[in-house]
Amino acid sequence: MQLLKELTEARGVSGYEQEVRSIMKRELMKANVEIKTDGLGGIFGEKEGDSHKPRILLAGHLDEVGFMVTEIMKSGYLRFSPLGGWWSQVLLSQRVSIITEQRTFTGVIGSRPPHVLTPEEQNKLIPIREMFIDIGAHSDEQVEEWGIRVGDPIVPICPFEIMPDQDTILAKALDNRVGCYLVLEVLKRLNMDKHPNTVIAGATVQEEVGLRGATTAPRLVEPDIAFALDVGIAEDQPGSEGKNKARLGKGPLITFLDATMIPNLPLRNYVIEVAKRSGIPYQVDTMTGGGTDAGKFHLYGKGVPSLVIGVAARYIHSHVSMVSKSDLDGAVQLLVEVIRGLNEEKYKDLVQYL
């Protein structure tokens, strides 16, 4: 878990993914693969197995949701804009890091206190535009002396922790350092196994602000098959329970539907067949309110058979989230078994439309 701890505690909001990219580069180089990067900052390692075809893309994304400094107020407070999707209700009184070229500052997200609000105002959600960040400064001149500038990234603060059940992981940025972790763990396993294809393993950038790195990455690596490795929504909290809802600890998650893609059906069915044959429990995700990098991957060129595989997560797009270690282990096992069977003959089954 040390690798996942390092990945989650690295600071890498959309557009500012340098710290996470350096960890990925270090780990990919350990795997003795050919490193490739695109012009936006995505990073991938290419590993050829027994054949150069089909080319299989395994991709997480480096970025996490966060913020950017957009205004320095005369009083010394900071206004900010979100990078990625945030629900304003989860923000107030949370600690954040403001990253400058010289040092890091701690701040707290605040707003007008409830004691001075009217009863009508107290019953309304406070929009992000009315919030500010308090860094303990007394004027805009002091903020500028400290080196904080408009455009500096702001990162949530939450240390990595394994909960008492020794399975539940609590951390920030599990969306989507989980994907980065899965990529690296699968690559380690493949270095000990034969596989009848070529694997391109890595991570894109700026997924949280519009799948931008997922547009450039396929042009770089030219995949025949693509897997986006990401988290899905766990619905095992009070008030959310129901049949066929994703839960922590019940196996990796295979996405059947999201707002950006209906997966390639032969690929989806093949993955399910592998899971059943290998005795790997799995869960199904159908989500109409979000998407992943696969939404762009599957549209590359003539069309790329694509699928999202990952794990269920609680509380994503906030300062803290939770996943299950056993689900991570199951996702790694499933992906390795899937890749072992993806030869050229199987690829032809996936592209029956051509």
Image: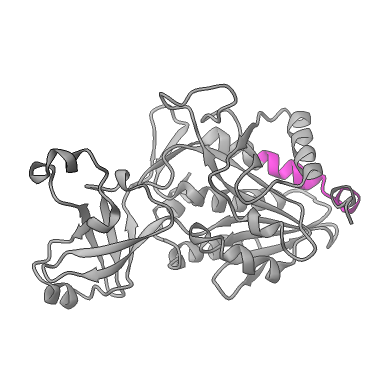
Residue at x 57%, y 67% (from the top left corner): 42
**Does residue 251 lie above or below 6 as drawn?**
above
Residue 199 location in percent, x, y?
73, 58
Question: Is residue 51 found left or right of 208 in the rendered image?
Answer: right
Residue 141 location in percent, x, y?
12, 77
Q: Quadrant of residue 41?
A: bottom right
Residue at x 27%, y 44% (from the top left corner): 125
Q: Quadrant of residue 28?
A: bottom right
Q: How is the image coloured?
A: one colour
Residue at x 42%, y 24% (from the top left corner): 239
Q: Quadrant of the C terminus?
A: bottom right
Badge count: 0
**Does residue 306 lie above or below 12 as drawn?**
above
In the depicted view, which residue is nearer to us: 316 or 89?
89
Magenta-highlighted residues: 333-347
Residue at x 17%, y 40% (from the top left corner): 120
Question: Is residue 151 found left or right of 65 in the rendered image?
Answer: left
Question: Is residue 310 found left or right of 234 in the rendered image?
Answer: right
Q: State the predominant SS element of the stretch in magenta.
A: helix
Residue 296 location in percent, x, y?
65, 59
Residue 335 part of the magenta segment: yes
Residue 236 part of the magenta segment: no
In the depicted view, which residue is nearer to us: 134 or 263?
263
Q: Residue furthest front?
A: 120
